[in-house]
Image (tube, rainbow, N blue to C red):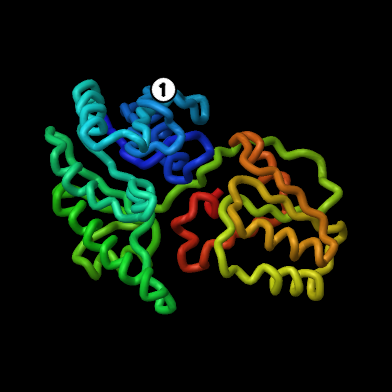
Amino acid sequence: MDILFICGSAELGNDGVGDYTRRLCGMLIRSGHKAEILALCDHQAPLFISENQVIEDTAVMVHRIPIAADNKQRFVYLQRILKDLEPDCISLQYVPYSFNPKGLPFWLPSYLKKIRGNHKWHIMFHELWLGIDAESSFRHKCIGKLQQLIAKKIVQNTRTHAVNTQNKLYQFFLKSHNIDAQILPICGNIPLTAVKKEAAEFAQFVLFGTIHNGAPFRDFIDDLIKNTTFNKPIKFVFIGNNGPELGNYKTILESYKIPYEVLGIQSEDVISQVLLDSDFGISTTPYFQTEKSGVYAA
């Protein structure tokens, strides 16, 4: 089977959905299929690029359209790729913010409707819309209503053959809009390439990826210090793009005199080694949404 995956961005290590899609393509290629990626609104591509990206010793062809391109030029690039590949299936890896910085890609349903061919459509909903939580602000609920309309229009315009999401919460909300989605668990977005080293001098906690606002980190550290005994001193390691909340976490650790190390964005091999060398992993993704996190899976 020939498959074209469409996502937002595909810079290695800079986009969680892009990293997931690359691993999935690699697995499909090793299984005998042909799979390519089209990054439709790539934030890191200065111009249109077609390149091989290697994942787990497998080369994946990735086409990257810069976010600065207008939709007319974007469609020309897409048509060129479709003509060469002639896919049996197009799989849209959907996150609203991947295709518009405000999460409102009004242009996308009509754009996808113009794509002609003998392919079938598949959609993977990695994220849905704002306003799901009862405590969501009025503004978020209004944006969420618009995002719901866009999601439904995408499904209608593509006459989607199959729909997936990765957690039961999203499945429930899609069902409430008459979109029948099956659960497809996601893999970790970091391949296991590391080799276990000798025991470290610290009991190491690792926090990989975005730190979500609102996680009770100070309470966690307070409980950790008061109620847990370790044979070794503890240490925290932050790796990846942790976001603006990192500063608050560093301040909390400093107040408890707990050593930490901030590694920032690293290669997949380095991240794999850090994860393997750590004793505990911390995720700030809300518990009921952990199934959707490639970082959590890693």
Horizontal and vertical percent for residue 153?
A: 18, 55
Horizontal and vertical percent for residue 218?
A: 70, 70
Residue 213 relative to residue 147: left or right: right
Horizontal and vertical percent for residue 97?
A: 38, 51
Residue 172 appears in view: no
Residue 113 appears in view: yes
Asked whether 182 or 264 is in front, the reply is: 264
Q: Secondary structure at mark 1?
A: strand
Q: Residue furthest bottom?
A: 134
Residue 295 relative to residue 70: left or right: right
Residue 86 relative to residue 136: left or right: left
Asked whether 70 or 43 is in front, the reply is: 70
* Disc 1 target residue: 51
Horizontal and vertical percent for residue 10?
A: 43, 36
Q: Residues within 10 Å of mark 1 (few under 14, many from 20)?
A: few
Residue at 37%, 57% in the rendered image? 127
The relative height of residue 257 versus residue 266 in the rendered view (above or below) is: below
Residue at 37%, 71% in the rendered image? 139
Total of numbered circles in the picture?
1
The relative height of residue 108 versus residue 60 in the rendered view (above or below) is: below
Q: Quadrant of residue 178?
A: bottom left
The relative height of residue 93 versus residue 36 in the rendered view (above or below) is: below
Residue at 70%, 43% in the rendered image? 263
Residue at 27%, 48% in the rendered image? 123
Residue 170 relative to residue 180: left or right: right
Identify residue type, mark 1.
Answer: Glu
Q: Quadrant of residue 75?
A: top left
The relative height of residue 205 versus residue 269 in the rendered view (above or below) is: below
Q: Quadrant of the N terminus?
A: top left
